[in-house]
Image (spheres, helix red, strand yellow):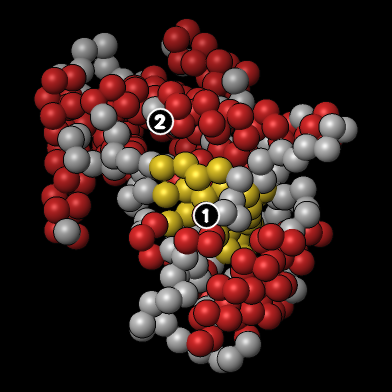
Amino acid sequence: MATAEQLKALIRSHLSDDSERFFTSALQIAAHEAGQGHGALAHDIRDMVDKARQVRGAAVLQFPVEMQGLVLAENPDLPISALVLQPEQLRRIERVLTEFEQQDKLKQHGLWHRRKLLLVGPPGTGKTMTAKILAHELHLSLFTIQVDRLVTKFMGETTAKLRQIFDLIQQEEGVYLFDEFDAIGGERSRDNDVGEMRRVLNAFLQFIEQDSSDSLIVAATNSPDLLDRALFRRFDDVLYYSQPDEEQRRRLIENVLGVFRPSRLAWKQVIEKSAGLSQAEIDRACRDAIKQAVLHDRLRVTSPDVLAMLADRGNASSGRR
């Protein structure tokens, strides 16, 4: 039978609406039951978790045929407590949430809430995660625009697709994420630019300026230097992301490991080994360590587990550079 601590962790995660930690706690119970020789029960718990994750990630809106594959829809389950950033960044994100939730009060005084955000920073530093958290906290669906499918070689087709997206933004309230935004937001004066892309950028500038929907528009880029300067004026707020410092790395590791964290972790070595890794890489390394524990029917990860997975991520990251 599950331990008292495991049951309390399961209940706490449910009451705090932290689905990912709830799933993690459930998987820990499955590992415990497997260790007790209850293989069938452990299998059933893991199967329920897998099915629940699939349901939560399922599309929430049926798109017209011409837009299928262009926009991906999901209901994220990441609470703001999962976001590990500098206090100033968190304060600004919380301000976006507060203004959105009290937009009617602002409108009574002729004021508008922040709806258009530009997120800037290296890959894996929390930009996409921020969009997911905004959607979860505001109880909205997240719609991710596949920018690589948006841009086509046919004159006028990209602008037409862009118009469809902004029509959707007007009709269906949600959080809309334009990832790798520099693909359509490039500087208009660049010598290697083509006339069609300049027209696309001009169309985007016009659409976002005219947009008066209640949706939240989020654009994310790894390359702010490529963006046209005129874009920055169209956004209500610009948030800059960076690689996590030592304190952020420790908090992130504690958050992800959750109930799988051992009572004693070789923190000095772990912090050193995680240096230079992004939030996303550290997150994946910790989840890989949890998988290792689950597959070996252990209730906790070990320091060697975490260090080995961080090393794997570090080697993979070095190979990409």
- The residue depicted at 43 percent of the width and 23 percent of the height is 87
Specify few, some or many for label 1: CA neighbours under 10 Å numbering under 14, 14-19, or 20 or more: some
Q: What residue type is labelled 2?
A: Leu
Residue designated by label 1: 232
Look at the image and tell me whether residue 198 can be seen.
Answer: yes
Q: In this view, which residue lies farthest toward the top?
A: 4
Q: Report the side of 209 relative to 317 (left or right).
A: right
User: On the image, which quarter does residue 15 sit in?
Assistant: top right
Q: Where residue 61 appears, x then y in whole percent?
A: 73, 59
Q: Which amino acid does label 1 sit on?
A: Phe
Q: Where residue 29 appears, x then y in whole percent?
A: 44, 23
Q: In which quarter of the image is the C terminus?
A: bottom left
Secondary structure of residue under mark 1: helix
Residue designated by label 2: 85
Camera-side residue of 309 and 151: 151
- The residue depicted at 46 percent of the width and 15 percent of the height is 6
Camera-side residue of 198 and 252: 198
Secondary structure of residue under mark 2: loop
